[in-house]
Amino acid sequence: MEKQMQAERTRRASILTAEGDKRSAILKAEGEKESSILRAEGEQKSAVLRAEGEAEAYRNVQAAQIEMTGKLFERLESSDLSPESLRYLYLKALPEMAKGPASKLFVVPSEIQDLAGTLGALAGGASLASEDGPQGEGEQRRLKARGADPNGELPARQENPL
């Protein structure tokens, strides 16, 4: 009888131990689940905040560039530079613009012949164009259209009406 009671106690103890282990494993799994959920939510919020910060920084850079461009146009409008001088400065700046990080697309001005004519006129080379050839006649017409003397003289700078 005593052996039966001892066996019954051992059986109950092993059942209680197994139930305790089971309960412990369940609680541990639930804790890990909640922990991973909280970690994922934290990472999500962090990613959202990081993206919002980057977007705000991008907007600030764009606003600064817009402001800078506006000031540049104001200065150009109030300057005494002739259109030919501005074209020359533009051509001079093209290589620097090509070096920029956003230089995947490079736009060449459609007036490249006029720009070349302007550069020739600035250098005094407009008088070298042949007057009897088709190219020389076109160059002479372009110079006259811009108000330049056919001998390569540039027009005088007119006052800015603004």
Image (cartoon, rainbow, N blue to C red):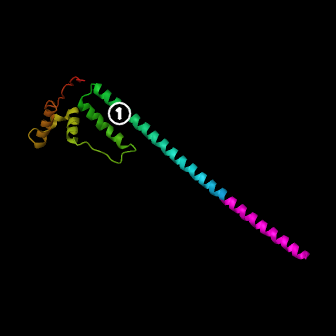
Q: Residue at x 8, y 40 (%)?
A: 132
Q: Is residue 27 magenta?
A: yes
Q: Residue at x 27, y 34 (%)?
A: 88
Residue 43 x/y as whole percent: 56, 50
Q: Is residue 117 left or right of residue 107?
A: left
**Rendered view: 99 above or below 67:** below
- Nearer to the camera, 150 or 108: 108
Residue 41 x/y as whole percent: 57, 51
**Rendered view: 1 above or below 47:** below
The N terminus, quarter of image = bottom right
Find residue 62 and report its image quarter.
Answer: top left
- Nearer to the camera, 24 or 49: 24
Residue identifier under label 1: 69
As drawn, the residue found furthest toward the front would be: 1
Q: Residue at x 81, y 69 (%)?
A: 12
Q: Main secondary structure of the magenta part?
A: helix
Under circle 1, the secondary element is helix
Residue 32 x/y as whole percent: 65, 57
Chain part drawn in magenta: 1-29
As drawn, the residue found furthest toward the right would be: 2
Q: Is residue 39 left or right of residue 98?
A: right
Q: Amino acid at mark 1?
A: Thr
- Nearer to the camera, 32 or 130: 32
Residue 6 x/y as whole percent: 88, 72
Q: Residue at x 35, y 48 (%)?
A: 104
Q: Is residue 14 magenta?
A: yes
How many discs mark residues in the rendered view? 1
Q: Residues within 10 Å of mark 1 (few under 14, many from 20)?
A: few
Find residue 118 and report its image quarter.
Answer: top left
The C terminus, quarter of image = top left
